Image (cartoon, rainbow, N blue to C red):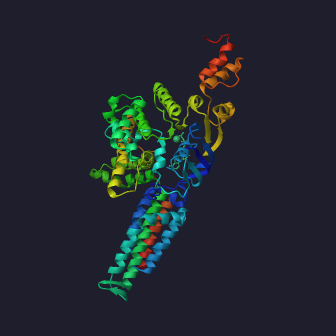
């Protein structure tokens, strides 16, 4: 449970930490978009160097990013294998029936691998350096224009914030209930599929009961403090772009120009 | 079953920057048949220590020996069931562990996991409900229809039904009304006396420590800073205050009376001791 790294915030005071969450969110999406422009060694090298610079600026150890890759490794390897075996063209190194390892296959496999790893690095960077609640604020702020066409942006943001806020609480609660049931002789994660499913019942039911309890308490607490929906509410944390955000934006533009220039 | 901690260290989430010390170099023995109280202010590592008693947590380094079981960092999670049966654990807010459709089934859940037959387990459930002071009528009720205090009793019954040799209690009476609290503590004491149950109790109530425990462990920031009988622990009020702990009410009263010229030796820890020492000083004789 605690090994889950995605969505884990690492407190810090680096240049990346201090960027506006909206900047980080937009830049991450933008970066993931333009990585699909890369199509040769030179352009991938550029993206790799850019990512490493961002990682270095965050002052977070590389190990954390590698740990972010680990849970996805089988998916990545599977996709890479598909690329290697099914892309045809160039020199054939090995073949067996309709399976063949070709020059194009290998380069494509390497590119896909690179693309996966860089995307994971960048999304890990976003979640490691941005508090979940700031991210929710950023989403709200960026979606604000949609309010005009009737999308309940503030309510959606509230739902998102509450959900994020209670992830750690529920994880704690899960650990506690698992421990209590282990102490009563439940073996989680052993036995056949049927036994494992049965073992989950004593965990899920208390967890559900608990979540409803929390939800009810929260609703009461919000009512008691006069919460009446989001419209017209002011914010405690006001988002404001500063000079570093402009620098980050320019860096993205430069990166795009470089990519277009280098790609085949 | 004697329980021995030998230089036990425990780190939460070892190997990540979230790592936090849970226990630091804890060495202590809890004798078979003893009644041990663990005190210390909030976050001092009491619950962490308790979870080592049935291998829910394993020491990062050092050894925990529980009867025939030796738990180290390398111990596998398999084959721990016999240990878990012998060490019954009542967690903080134990009512959160209820899940079955009826109280009877929930209490029978533990024993059944340890291989007791359905029939036998339900029989145990009926006995335990009585033991924790609930009427038979709750047996067929849903545990979720009960009050918080009643749910706590059902959860405690569920642990007692496993017929453990060691009973580990993490603030079992927090949130109960005073009468319920006294009843529960008396029930544990009776099990301790009649069945020789080893009891390990975490509590913030110094009165309970004075009334029941024969050994006290004082925790502070993951370290075991003092071990001894209640009398030795409560002998130094200034030290207790410095560690955000207090005296039992009887000792507090004796302290106040000492300021007015009364004398107590030894320091009274229970109401009877206080009364006995006080009577001659206020000119009363022994009652007949
Ligand atoms: N799952 C966990 N992950 C990381 N740190 C934890 C975890 N559980 C407890 N800790 C930390 O370990 C320390 C000891 O916690 P523990 O729960 O043992 O305290 P306690 O003495 O039982 O307190 P209380 O009287 O409030 O129950 C605390 O500093 C706590 O923050
Ligand atoms: Mg605790």
Residue A24 pos. (x, y %)? 45, 60
Q: Hey, which quadrant is residue A108 in on the image? A: bottom left
Left/right placement of residue A229 relative to residue B195 reads left
What residue appears at the point 31 percent right and 48 percent down from the top-left corner?
A: A152
A242 or A114: nearer the viewer: A114
Which quarter of the rendering shows the N terminus of chain A? bottom left
B26 or A41: nearer the viewer: B26
Which quarter of the rendering shows the C terminus of chain A? bottom left
A53 to A86, vertically: above or below? above
Residue B94 pos. (x, y %)? 44, 39
What residue appears at the point 72 percent right and 17 percent down from the top-left corner?
A: B261
Residue B99 pos. (x, y %)? 35, 42
B202 to A257, vertically: above or below? above
Left/right placement of residue A142 relative to residue B52 reads left
Mark yes or no: residue B143 visible: yes
Left/right placement of residue A209 relative to residue B217 reads left
Numbered circles on residues, count: 0
Residue B31 pos. (x, y %)? 59, 41
Left/right placement of residue A67 relative to residue B34 reads left
Mark yes or no: residue A228 visible: no
Q: Hey, which quadrant is residue B72 in on the image? A: bottom right
């Amino acid at each position: 449970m605690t090994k889950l790294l995605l969505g884990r915030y690492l407190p810090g005071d680096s240049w990346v930490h201090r960027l506006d969450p909206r900047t980080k969110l937009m830049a991450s999406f933008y970066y993931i978009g333009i990585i699909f422009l890369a199509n040769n060694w030179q352009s991938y090298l550029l993206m790799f160097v850019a990512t490493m610079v961002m990682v270095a600026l965050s002052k977070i150890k590389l190990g954390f990013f590698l740990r972010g890759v680990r849970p996805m490794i089988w998916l990545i390897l599977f996709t890479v294998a598909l690329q290697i075996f099914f892309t045809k063209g160039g020199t054939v190194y090995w073949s067996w029936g309709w399976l063949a390892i070709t020059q194009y296959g290998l380069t494509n496999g390497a590119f896909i691998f690179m693309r996966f790893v860089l995307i994971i690095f960048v999304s890990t960077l976003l979640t490691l350096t941005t508090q979940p609640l700031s991210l929710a604020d950023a989403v709200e702020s960026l979606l604000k224009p949609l309010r005009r066409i009737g999308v309940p942006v503030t309510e959606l943001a509230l739902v998102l914030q509450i959900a994020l806020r209670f992830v750690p609480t529920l994880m704690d609660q899960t650990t506690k209930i698992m421990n209590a049931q282990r102490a009563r002789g439940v073996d989680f994660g052993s036995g056949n599929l049927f036994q494992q499913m049965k073992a989950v019942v004593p965990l899920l039911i208390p967890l559900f009961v608990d979540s409803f309890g929390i939800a009810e308490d929260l609703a009461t607490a919000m009512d008691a403090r006069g919460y009446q929906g989001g419209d017209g509410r002011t914010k405690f944390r006001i988002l404001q772009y500063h000079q570093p955000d402009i620098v980050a934006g320019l860096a993205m533009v430069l990166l795009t120009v470089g990519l277009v220039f280098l790609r085949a | 079953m004697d329980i021995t901690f030998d230089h036990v260290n425990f780190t939460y989430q070892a190997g990540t920057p979230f790592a936090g010390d849970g226990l630091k170099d804890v060495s202590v023995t809890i004798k078979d048949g003893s009644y041990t109280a663990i005190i210390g202010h909030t976050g001092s590592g009491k619950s962490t220590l308790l979870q080592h008693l049935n291998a829910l947590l394993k020491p990062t380094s050092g050894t925990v020996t529980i009867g025939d079981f030796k738990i180290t960092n390398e111990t596998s999670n398999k084959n721990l069931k016999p240990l878990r049966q012998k060490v019954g654990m009542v967690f903080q807010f134990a009512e959160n562990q209820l899940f079955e459709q009826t109280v009877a089934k929930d209490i029978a859940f533990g024993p059944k996991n340890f291989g007791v037959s359905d029939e036998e387990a339900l029989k145990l459930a009926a006995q335990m409900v009585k033991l924790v002071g609930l009427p038979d009528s709750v047996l067929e009720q849903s545990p979720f229809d009960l009050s918080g205090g009643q749910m706590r009793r059902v959860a405690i019954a569920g642990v007692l039904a496993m017929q453990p040799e060691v009973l580990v209690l993490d603030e079992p009476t927090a949130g109960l009304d005073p009468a319920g609290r006294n009843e529960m503590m008396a029930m544990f004491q009776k099990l301790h006396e009649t069945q020789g149950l080893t009891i390990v109790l975490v509590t913030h109530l110094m009165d309970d420590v004075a009334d029941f425990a024969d050994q006290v462990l004082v925790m502070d920031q993951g370290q075991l800073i003092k071990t001894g009988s209640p009398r030795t622990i409560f002998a130094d009020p200034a030290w207790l205050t410095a560690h955000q702990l207090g005296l039992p009410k009887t000792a507090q009263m004796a302290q106040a009376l000492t300021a007015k010229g009364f004398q107590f030796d030894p320091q009274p820890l229970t109401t009877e001791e206080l009364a006995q020492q006080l009577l001659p000083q206020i000119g009363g004789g022994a009652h007949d």
